Amino acid sequence: MSVRYIAEYAEDAMLALAIARKEASHLRYTQTTLFHEAIDEAWVTELDDNEERAEKVDAFVSRFGRLQDFIGEKLIPRFAALLGENPKSLLDMLAFAEKMEWLKSAENFIAARKLRNLLVHEYMTDTQLFLQALLSANAATDMLLAVVNAIAGEAGRLSLPSPQTKRF
């Protein structure tokens, strides 16, 4: 018999996956509702006068950042530990995720982190920069969702048990 994963880490890994799936679902919903119409410079300029639209942008930015943080700080590290790995830095973690084919490009993940900062800090000051960051974040969302799906696929291949309910 060969060991496929370290059983004592399975519950934490699956709990992290359950949370990531929930966060991913919320982000996908917000992405779909926000980007159902064409977004251009005029659309961004009108954010100041459109509370509903501004609220959707805020929800998208928040959920985008939260899922990204969770993937890098909880999901990948817990699945790495499950598989007997112990990457120390975020770069090591992302390299491991690339090796496992959960993530296509660590570079794109890091670029998405920069987008989050632009979305938070350029909101009110530079319309064109904010527009580009928002459109790029839309594309980067698909990358984040793909990571969650890839790790869910890994959990399926490993036949991991469902987690017991507990809090982090």
Image: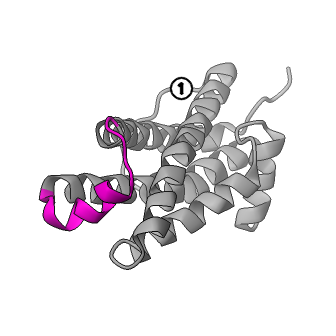
Give the residue displayed 58% in from the left and 67% down from the top: 114
Quarter of the figure with the N terminus: top right
Q: Is residue 59 above or below residue 144?
A: below
Q: Which residues are magenta?
A: 36-51
Query: What residue is shown with label 1?
Result: 161
Q: Quadrant of residue 62?
A: bottom left
Q: Secondary structure at mark 1?
A: loop
**Magenta stretch containing residue 1, yes or no?**
no
In the image, what residue type sits under mark 1?
Pro
Quarter of the figure with the C terminus: bottom left
Q: Is residue 21 left or right of residue 1?
A: left
Specify few, some or many for label 1: CA neighbours under 10 Å numbering under 14, 14-19, or 20 or more.
Answer: few
- Asked whether the viewer can see residue 39, the reply is yes
| x, y percent for residue 37 | 31, 38
Q: Is residue 127 left or right of residue 87?
A: left
The kind of secondary structure the magenta stretch mainly shows is helix
| x, y percent for residue 104 | 75, 41
| x, y percent for residue 107 | 75, 57
Give the residue displayed 69% in from the left and 53% down from the top: 108
Colour scheme in the image?
one colour
